Image (tube, rainbow, N blue to C red):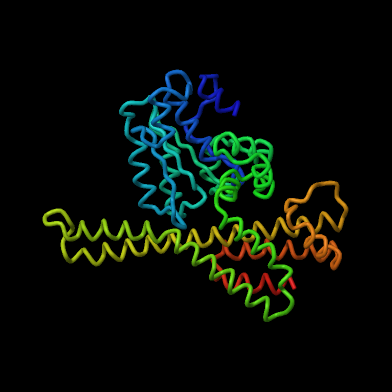
């Protein structure tokens, strides 16, 4: 964070109008961006206590705009709204700061619109783009940004945070920090949600249940359907509130759109809700792939005798048994199959087909 402190502190050549903050899941990209935005607005370079800091961190500062998509992509219309916002002078703060948490999800047309705004920035405008890696952002944009690469926090730091902030038992905090591989949000979810811990256990027992082709296909179907059901359940309440609000708008005399536009409004909301559910579904599937990656990593550790601890200590017996019945070469092939499944999902291969191919490869 020394780079950000230097920029806030006015060190010569340390500040720029566009930043690309990268790091693996759980590294705190968006938190770093919000803290940087608060410091840019603060008269004391980030005291954390003044009104500018508090409102910037909470998302209510009039000159700090945060874009966090719940859908698969950030479209050109949303980017154009940001560009118009970027051209405005700050109303109360020192700068106009725009944070895009999922810059890797900006569409090609959206990237074209964003590029022009970054190439010709307003005088007091700062763009903070967040993405997993620099390669996830189109080269024309990342070449015009200053890169700040974050790393995954150590397990000990995650455990201390869970104990201090969330009151998690120290032993439980150390356990979930380890199995979450440094991902703070995931560690917190595992510590606070027994259902999340049960889903993890269910995924980790899958390799031992793949005894034949029929079992592999059934396991793929079960996992994909379970992830979809979890996504739908997670969004059901929000979907209902949004639909109720739209219905009220459509029926309020003199305030809603014309009747001929009502069907279009309902259709648009339904599509947006579907995209949000689909993204959460994909996130659930990606979490399952992360668990499988950790499982086979542990199997490989046992097979090679590497002097490192297992991620999944609670599954040590099953992992040791799996290691004894295979070779390191076969385990590496299984890890490659998990990676291939993730790449297929990124290319929009139907999830069921991707997981069927994966589980057949894991036999």
Name which quarter of the figure residue 325 lies in: bottom right
Residue 273 x %, y %: 38, 61
Image height of 358 relative to 292, above or below:
below
Q: Residue furthest left?
A: 254
Depth order, front residue of 144/167: 167
Residue visible at 66% across and 73% down in the picture: 357
Name which quarter of the figure residue 353 lies in: bottom right
Image height of 261 relative to 192, above or below:
below
Residue visible at 11% across and 57% down in the picture: 253
Residue visible at 36% across and 47% down in the picture: 80
Q: Is residue 170 left or right of residue 104?
A: right
Residue 223 x %, y %: 59, 69
Residue 199 x %, y %: 60, 61
Quadrant the C terminus occupies: bottom right
Q: Residue furthest bottom?
A: 214
Residue 189 x %, y %: 56, 49
Residue visible at 23% across and 61% down in the picture: 247
Q: Residue furthest front?
A: 169
Q: Is residue 331 left or right of residue 43?
A: right
Q: Is residue 87 left or right of residue 137?
A: left
């Amino acid at each position: 964070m020394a780079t950000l402190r230097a920029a806030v502190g006015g060190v010569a050549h340390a500040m720029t109008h566009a930043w690309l903050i990268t790091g693996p899941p759980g590294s705190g990209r968006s938190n770093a961006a919000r803290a940087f935005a608060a410091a840019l607005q603060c008269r004391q370079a980030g005291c954390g206590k003044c009104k500018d800091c508090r409102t910037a961190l909470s998302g209510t500062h009039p000159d700090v705009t945060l874009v966090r998509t719940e859908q698969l992509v950030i479209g050109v219309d949303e980017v154009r709204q940001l560009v118009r916002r970027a051209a405005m002078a700050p109303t109360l703060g020192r700068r106009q700061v725009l944070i895009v948490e999922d810059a890797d999800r900006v569409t090609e047309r959206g990237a074209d619109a964003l590029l022009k705004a970054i190439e010709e920035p307003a005088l007091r405008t700062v763009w903070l783009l967040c993405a997993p890696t620099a390669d996830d952002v189109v080269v024309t944009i990342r070449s015009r940004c200053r890169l700040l690469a974050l790393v995954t926090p150590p397990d000990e730091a995650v455990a201390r945070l869970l104990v201090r902030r969330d009151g998690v038992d120290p032993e439980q905090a150390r356990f979930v920090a380890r199995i979450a591989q440094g991902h703070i949000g995931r560690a917190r979810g595992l510590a606070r949600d027994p259902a999340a811990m049960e889903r993890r256990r269910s995924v980790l027992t899958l390799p031992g249940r793949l005894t034949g082709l029929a079992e592999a296909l059934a396991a793929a179907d079960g996992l994909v359907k379970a992830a979809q059901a979890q996504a739908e359940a997670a969004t059901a309440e929000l979907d209902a509130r949004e639909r109720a609000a739209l219905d009220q708008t459509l029926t309020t005399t003199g305030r809603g759109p014309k009747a001929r536009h009502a069907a279009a409004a309902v259709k648009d909301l339904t599509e947006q809700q579907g995209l949000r559910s689909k993204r959460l579904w994909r996130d659930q599937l990606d979490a399952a792939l992360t668990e499988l990656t950790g499982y086979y990593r542990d199997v490989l550790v046992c097979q090679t005798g590497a002097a490192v601890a297992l991620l999944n200590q609670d599954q040590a017996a099953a992992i040791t048994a799996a290691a004894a019945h295979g070779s390191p070469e076969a385990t590496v092939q299984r890890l490659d199959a998990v990676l291939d499944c993730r790449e297929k999902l990124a290319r929009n291969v139907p999830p069921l087909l991707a997981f069927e191919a994966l589980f057949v490869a894991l036999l």
